[in-house]
Amino acid sequence: MKKWRNLVPALLAAAILCLSAVPALATFDQSALDGIIMITTGAPDDDGKMSYWRGTGFFIGAEGENPQYIVTNCHVIEEFILAGKALGGGELHVLFDKDDEAEAYLVDYDAEKDVAILRLAEATDKRIPLQMRVPQESSLGSQAYAVGYPAAADLTVAAVNSFSQKDATVTTGSISRFLTESGTGRKLIQTDASLGGGNSGGPLFDGSGVVIGINTAGSKLDTNLFYAVSVSEVLPLLDKNSVPYAVAEEKAGGGIPVLYIGIAAGAMLLLIVIVVAVLLNRKKKTAQAAPAVQAARNQTGSPLLRSMAPQHGGMVVQLHGSPVQLGRDANLCRLVYQDGTPGVSSRHCQVYYDQRESVFVVTDLNSTYGTFLSNGQRIAPNTPVKLPPRSSFYLGETDNTVYVDLE
């Protein structure tokens, strides 16, 4: 056994040599966060009750100058537009942080390309303009970073949130494909950098910290497929409206190929397995998992449900003693899904908050596709199920997930 132990230093030296032979991975330039912003929109329903949504945008402008203009997705502000904009009671704001917001104004949009331009009343020194670059085929397989404010991140963990650029979520992946959408001719970037509701309109960066796309949507068929609209689709709209922007110079080698990452990871994994096997000295120990401990918490706040469906953009519905129905029938349901939404019936399910027991009560209304708990268990039709705060369920498909909580 001493002979094997003497191999440990040699193995570690080999690991260092392997890593030194692999190009260093690019790291995310955190200064890029100073160019993004959270966007909030509001629109009244037929009864005048306001509903609110959120998304992401990023500032553009001449390099070195305070920016005034913001790029985002058209669908981020869709409800604001449909409401008749500000004259129809719609609201459009940006949040620098939770105590600092400003009204934004719509400059122009292209619904088919899903891009929009906003502006502030005046330039701001609270953010910086980001540079853009039209992505090239040569960057296929290189690193990409998606930045935004996915609502799920704030619902999964109750973090202290200022809604500033420091609270943005950064996910990393690679550019897996460039494609043109049939019917619209829209240029899209396919990536595996994770996106969620609220990410829409945020920037997709390449490995050098330049914006190459506008985060837009995820696939309903594959949880690892996400799409960004190429910045090439917004440049004509910027030129049309004489909006200033900066384009970064082309750089060779758009990032670190994923192949290098796989080689490095595989080599390190093999070495770690060997070293661990030696250090264990053939002693097999059974790992005993510590029992899960659930901390009891006294929760206070107003009961609400929050839709995580992309079409709702984090929409919130307040709950009281009366049941709130969910489904596609706009005449009966408080949370209304678009016609044709997969898995959702006209009158799908209902939810209310039982204040006496401090639980949410969910009942499937004999829906066609079923109502499911987060663990995949289907709720029996017309049978109330009690859920504690910070629970979730979904209508037919996981894309239609709904969270319930006290806030």
Image: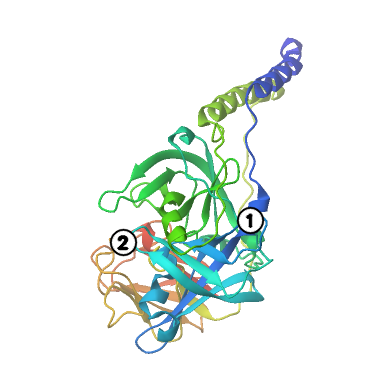
Picture layout, residue 144 above or below residue 316? above
> Horizontal placement of 195 versus 98: left or right?
left
- Quadrant position of residue 393: bottom left
Q: Which mark is residue 166?
A: none
Q: Position of residue 326 (x, y in %)?
A: 34, 74
User: Which callout, 2 or 1, points at the residue further toward the start of the chain?
Assistant: 1
Amino acid type at image mark 1:
Leu
Picture layout, residue 295 above or below residue 146? below
Q: Position of residue 372 (x, y in %)?
A: 36, 62
| Of the two numbered discs 2 and 1 in the rendering, the one whose residue sits closer to the viewer | 1
Q: Residues within 10 Å of mark 2 (few under 14, many from 20)?
A: many
Query: Which residue appears at 38% of the width and 81% of the height?
Result: 84
Q: Is residue 89 visible?
A: no
In the foreground, 196 or 383: 196
Disc 1 element: helix
Q: Which mark is residue 33?
A: 1
> Horizontal placement of 94 versus 77: left or right?
right
Q: Position of residue 333 (x, y in %)?
A: 32, 79
> Horizontal placement of 387 versus 32: left or right?
left
The residue wearing badge 2 is 396
Q: Residues within 10 Å of mark 1 (few under 14, many from 20)?
A: many
Query: Which residue appears at 68% of the width and 23% of the height?
Result: 20
- Quadrant position of residue 101: bottom right
Picture layout, residue 240 above or below residue 92? above
- Of all residues, the one furthest to the top in this rendering is 3
Amino acid type at image mark 2:
Gly
Query: Which residue appears at 46% of the width and 58% of the height?
Result: 239
Disc 2 element: loop
- Do the numbered discs 2 and 1 sit on residues whose CB atoms are within 8 Å? no
Quadrant position of the N terminus in the picture? top right
Quadrant position of the C terminus in the picture? bottom right
- Quadrant position of residue 311: bottom left
